[in-house]
Amino acid sequence: MKVLVKKGWRPLGVLLLLLCIWEVYVKLANIQGWLLPAPSSIAKEGVSGYAELAPHIQSTVGLAIGGFLIGCAVGILVAILLHLVPGFHESVYPLLILSQNVPIIVLAPLLVIWLGFGLLPKVIVITLVCFFPVAVAAMDGFRSAPAEMKRYMLMVGASKMQIFTKLEWPYALSSVFSGLKISATYSIMGAVISEWLGAKKGLGVYMTLASSSFRTDRVFVAIFIIMFLSLLFFGVITLMENRLIKWRKRKVL
């Protein structure tokens, strides 16, 4: 964690430099605010309009967390079934890959037609976005367990479930957290896309209203908040990983 803090100033410095270049370019080129607002104008709008923006942020965060938890639970369950049930991997895994080739932006309107404008189609969209990285990462983690240790456990009479719980699952935790971090960043974007289906509030709704009224500064405010929330979710999962996988730290040291 200390290493991350020490190195954190480098990307932050690059980001500040890019924002300064952006600010100077907009001022010197005399670009209209509705076309490309300056970072200072975006920050001013974010501060002045926070009271209006806060309910949208809360709605998106709540939706993203709920969909993320359901999607990750489904992903881990699917990975366990694919790993433990004979013949299940060969039968179902190709279908999982095909499910990721269907564009969410195309599938979302169909879910509204089938399920209405309620919460269910939005949760399904986020679940579809989140479950696949977790499932693939978990399956790779299960296969990463040392073969010699599996043979040793079989020699002493361990069952398949004992091998999974005592060996394969602990070795898969690092891979599972990799999938969780990817899904955490996807969950925010999935929530925003799902809000385009017809939600009453949320960052997706806020962006749509701002774009239709040519309030480009508000659009950028929403974009920066989405980026910040994605980084925040990623950081929370990283902290959980550092706390739970202590054997990984000892191995590094």
Image: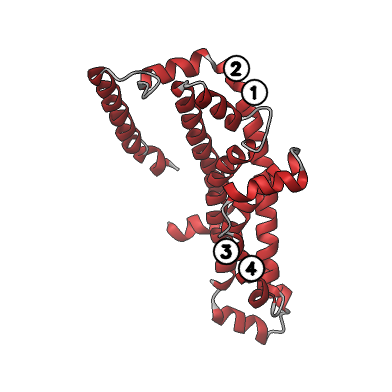
- At label 1, which amino acid type do we have? Pro
| Image point (29%, 26%), residue name | 22
Q: Specify the quadrant of the image occupied by residue 66.
A: top right
| Image point (35%, 21%), residue name | 38
Q: Which residue ends up furthest to the top in the rendered image?
A: 48
Q: Residues within 10 Å of mark 3 (few under 14, many from 20)?
A: many
Q: Contact, CB < 8 Å: mark 2 with mark 3?
A: no
Seen in the picture, residue 213 relative to 156 is either above or below; the reply is: above
Q: How is the image coloured?
A: secondary structure
- At label 4, which amino acid type do we have? Leu
Tell me which numbered mark, 3 or 4, is placed earlier along the sequence.
4
Find disc 3 in the rendering and name its residue. 136
Which label number is shown at residue 52? 2
* Label 4, label 2: how far apart the Cα atoms are: 43 Å
Whole-percent x and y of residue 134?
59, 57
Find disc 4 in the rendering and name its residue. 95
| Image point (57%, 26%), residue name | 206
Q: Residues within 10 Å of mark 4 (few under 14, many from 20)?
A: few
Find disc 1 in the rendering and name its residue. 55
- At label 3, which amino acid type do we have? Val
* Label 2, label 3: how far apart the Cα atoms are: 39 Å
Tell me which numbered mark, 4 or 1, is placed earlier along the sequence.
1
